[in-house]
Amino acid sequence: MSKKLLLKDAHVEGIRYFETYRKQGGYGAAEKALKMTPDEILEEVKTSGLRGRGGAGFPTGMKWSFLAKPEGVPRHLVVNADESEPGTFKDRYLMEFLPHLLIEGMLISSYCLGSNVSYIYIRGEYSWIPDILEEAIEEAKAAGFLGKNILGTGFDCEIYVQRGGGAYICGEETALLESLEGKRGNPRLKPPFPAVKGLWERPTVVNNVESIAAIVPIIDITGAEYAKIGVGRSTGTKLISACGNINKPGVYEIDMTITVEEFIYSDEYCGGIPNGKKLKACIPGGSSVPIVPANLLLKTVNGEPRYMNYESLADGGFATGTMMGSGGFIVLDEDQCVVEHTMTLARFYNHESCGQCTPCREGTGWMYKILKKIEKGEGKMEDIDLLWDIQRKIEGNTICPLGDAAAWPVAAAIRHFRDEFEWHIKNPELSQTQNYGLANY
Ligand code: NAD
Ligand code: SF4
């Protein structure tokens, strides 16, 4: 059984409220941290090996150490709670059921980074969660864990919750900062990174909800103990939101030593695939990461089992591997049609493109139109090569990663499931009434 660090108290009745959270030992890590120096906390975070849980997996301690500290300029911590990646809902779970874990993590992180005013930017569709967070903030303040002179240390910290307007692009950190400043959420060119020029051009650390929540156990058990959990550079525990064709969709905390097979089939996690259907493929890290067919999902190119961690999932590069991403684990059984699935994603990215870069603005639209044509049985064989060509022209040629995120699913679908594209083209009449999966299994 995986060790639980973040969700260990998730099922304690009333854990959402300060009194119960405190009874369970909550804010103990904050009390410990406030007796340490900011540099000592930073060392613990670096030692823990924690990697950003939003999707990129960038080392959190390194990001914090890049924070510029010009004399007299305020610094900020901004928590990215704009969890919009299709298939990803782990931050929602944390915020809804364990809001004080996030607030405690923010207090420790704000103290370490020197942020007296910190923000949570939350996606508009999570309309019921800001109230939960604001209540937790008020409770923490009443207990002396936020506000002025926290626990007599002289450190002041306020936390504000800002609701987004429902645009996927505002989860990209620089678009988020633009939106937080009250502007249209268009991504900025990087560098400069937010650590140097962020919110209102001030040094800013933008971290995902889960990354900040993980600071609490890191301080609690020490960075060295945290680093012993997991394997290699995949230290600590990771939340996975599992969905699609599985018996037990939900949010699971894993220690990154389990295999993909165990995760899908064990009763502790997904509980297998309904109706005894076969596994076709999986997208293990949210919709932006490459889809992987079952044979490559259960084994690496070297025949080793594939593990649920950053390195093993990426084994073999994009040709045969994928990415841990945001931990949005989407399972497709044999009845699903990869062309239809890819078309749905293409429509999403086309709709969510901010339109600043030509390859993304135009390319996502073209990909959607071509995929729609193929899926309806109106495509030609040349369309597959055209799709391939368009995705190649988007990848790496845009301001923000949305372009790559739109290109990769198309590339991986053609690479691994070309036969499905060809089936739609060769069977125009059938493909108007059936999907590939149902017609072929
Ligand atoms: P990135 O690799 O560009 O950056 C990762 C982080 O490291 C950023 O905070 C960046 O500022 C920082 N960083 C990198 N180099 C730095 C440097 N030299 N100096 C200072 N800071 C530096 O990736 P990203 O654009 O932040 O994220 C992309 C990922 O987001 C994708 O892989 C995808 O999995 C994920 N994603 C998640 C969601 C979600 O809902 N959770 C939605 C869409 C995409
Ligand atoms: Fe906007 Fe797409 Fe360019 Fe990102 S890649 S800045 S979403 S047009």
Image (cartoon, grey):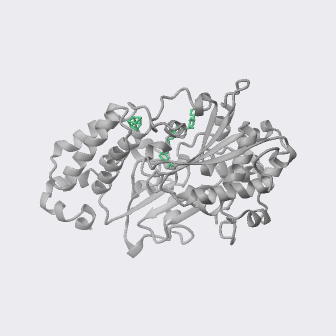
- 335, 192: nearer the viewer: 192
Q: Give residue 430's position: percent from left, percent from top.
A: 15, 63
Looking at this rendering, what residue extends furthest in the left direction? 429
Q: Is 22 rendered above or below residue 112?
A: below
Q: Which image quadrant is residue 114 in?
A: top right
> Which quadrant: the N terminus?
bottom right
- 268, 136: nearer the viewer: 136
Looking at this rendering, what residue extends furthest in the bottom direction? 275
Q: Is residue 318 left or right of residue 150?
A: left
Q: Is residue 48 left or right of residue 148?
A: left
Q: How many marks?
A: 0
Q: Give residue 199's position: percent from left, percent from top.
A: 59, 34
> Which quadrant: the C terminus?
bottom left
* Residue 221 seen in this snapshot: no
Q: Is residue 376 left or right of residue 164?
A: left
Q: Which image quadrant is residue 352 in?
A: top left
Q: Is residue 290 left or right of residue 237?
A: left
Q: Give residue 270's position: percent from left, percent from top.
A: 50, 67
State the residue at coordinates (27%, 46%): 368
State the residue at coordinates (52%, 63%): 263
Q: Is 365 rendered above or below residue 439?
A: above
Looking at this rendering, what residue extends furthest in the top direction? 71
Q: Is 39 rendered above or below residue 237?
A: above
State the residue at coordinates (24%, 49%): 371
- 49, 261: nearer the viewer: 49
* Residue 347 seen in this snapshot: yes
Q: Give residue 316's position: percent from left, percent from top.
A: 45, 44
